[in-house]
Image (cartoon, rainbow, N blue to C red):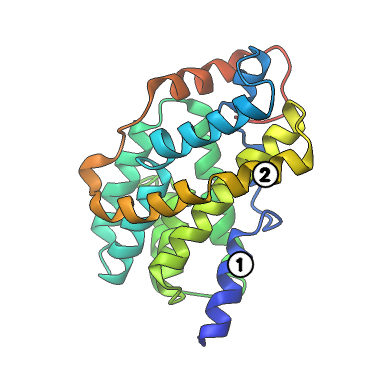
Amino acid sequence: MSTKDQFFTMLQISDSVFPIGSYTQSNGLETYVQKGIIKDKKSAEEYLKSVLWNSYMYGDFLAVKLAYEYTNNNDMKKIIELDEILWAVKASREMKEGSSKLCIRFIKLIEKFYKEKFIIEYGDTIKSGECMGQHSIVYGSFSALAKIPKENALRSYLYNAASSVVNNCAKLIPLGQVDGQEILFGVQELLQKMTIEIEKLSIDDIGRCCISFDIRAMEHEELYSRLYMS
């Protein structure tokens, strides 16, 4: 795969229109909005910064990094271990199931245009019940197999996560599109800092997060009305 192909492939798998259903997940954000905690541009920006640094950093973002490295070492045993740990530390049932569904859809989709033994093997562990499947893991693994530079893979995944939060805020608060873009521009320094800090973390750091995000995600299951599945 050429450098140009790697770049366009990276854009494709991190695009919000990549049809795996990521737009259906709010990961507890809807609870914050319904409780009136997140209600305007200022609170949306505060939430975004906090959830990225205190939750994504020690969860799915770290899993992308580790999965990338394990795949380069052809270490399926480590991938399985990472899958088990990541599933365990996600407290909300909906977040567990949502990530698993995204992973399964991702695998089915990429198998149509990019067959790789390592990804197929991971998919088989999910079918057998040995793994539950995590979107961040298959994203990191596929990025390594597609020869997308690790830093680029991490940056694209992180930006997509931030963009998804802002897009959800635009629908739920609601938040103006211009306000949303200003928030995204405003967190660029944080995103850069996270891509540097992530290299210092290991699998022992998985699960270090702010418990309030888990609580809001669990409360989402009991909301009277919902736009999102998590």
Q: Mark 2 = which residue?
A: 182
Q: Residue furthest bottom?
A: 2
Residue for point 46% across, 32% down: 50
- Looking at the rendered structure, the secondary structure element under dot 1 is helix
Looking at the rendered structure, the kind of residue marked 2 is Glu
Residue for point 55% across, 15% down: 219
Front residue of 8/128: it is 8
Q: In which quadrant of the rendered image does the C terminus lie? A: top right
Label 1 neighbour load within 10 Å: few <14, some 14-19, many 20+: some
* Mark found first going from the N terminus, 1 or 2: 1
- Looking at the rendered structure, the secondary structure element under dot 2 is helix
Instruction: Give the numbered dot on residue 11.
Output: 1
Looking at the rendered structure, the kind of residue marked 1 is Leu
Front residue of 192/92: it is 192
Image position of 32 with respect to 3: above or below: above
Front residue of 122/96: it is 96
Image position of 4 with respect to 53: above or below: below
Left or right placement of residue 17 versus residue 208 in this view: right
Q: Position of residue 67 (x, y in %)?
A: 34, 58
Whether residue 190 is visible to the viewer of this picture, yes or no, is yes
Judge depth for marks 1 and 2 and give the one in front.
2
Label 2 neighbour load within 10 Å: few <14, some 14-19, many 20+: few
Whether residue 27 is visible to the viewer of this picture, yes or no, is no
